[in-house]
Amino acid sequence: MSSSTAVNPVLRVAPAAPSVAAAHFRASLAFHADVSDVAAALATDGEPGFVVLDSRSTESWGQGHIPGALHLPTALIPEQAEQLLDRSVAVVTYCWGPGCNGATRAALALAELGYQVKEMLGGFEYWVREGFEFETWEGRERRVPDPLTAPAGAADCGC
């Protein structure tokens, strides 16, 4: 097949109709929050309207976690969520990063228990890469933002 008659791999499957695409993307926003939005909400005065839950192991939590996050490994959610969480407050879960589905599993476990939940896209990896403060057993840290994940010299990415 010549390049002029080859099927464009992007359009091999046609895009969804605009109304179907809008419904999909609207639903996606109901399930996900990004790191920058979570950080901005946590930085405001008052209650952000949600709690952040780190679903990783105790060893991972000790390597670093979002300040103010609750620690509840996914395997312990069924037996401990009720003692730590209020069902009237939304929960935002995170795990290591985009290559890990631990936050998804934690969000599923919480939803099955009746909690309103969103997953934080990018996880702890992108929290650190975007230059937000985190805590370790030694104290608080902040790294220089990675220019591939955070805007250089701007307050936000404008998206």
Image (cartoon, rainbow, N blue to C red):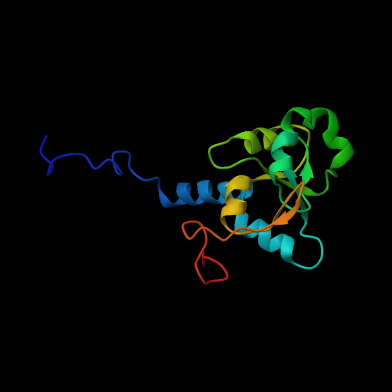
Percent coordinates x, y for residue 53 in the rendering: 74, 44
Residue at far front of view? 138
**Is the N terminus in the top left, top right, bottom left or bottom right quadrant?**
top left
Residue at figure coordinates x 56%, y 67% from the top left: 156
Residue 35 position by quadrant: bottom right
Residue at figure coordinates x 71%, y 51% from the top left: 66
Percent coordinates x, y for residue 112 in the rendering: 74, 32
Percent coordinates x, y for residue 60 in the rendering: 69, 38
Image label count: 0
Relative to 125, residue 157 above or below: below
Percent coordinates x, y for residue 29 in the rendering: 59, 51
Residue at figure coordinates x 86%, y 36% from the top left: 82
Left or right of 116 in this view: 18: left
50 or 147, nearer to the observer:
147
Instruction: Tell me if residue 54 can be seen.
Output: no
Relative to 157, residue 75 above or below: above
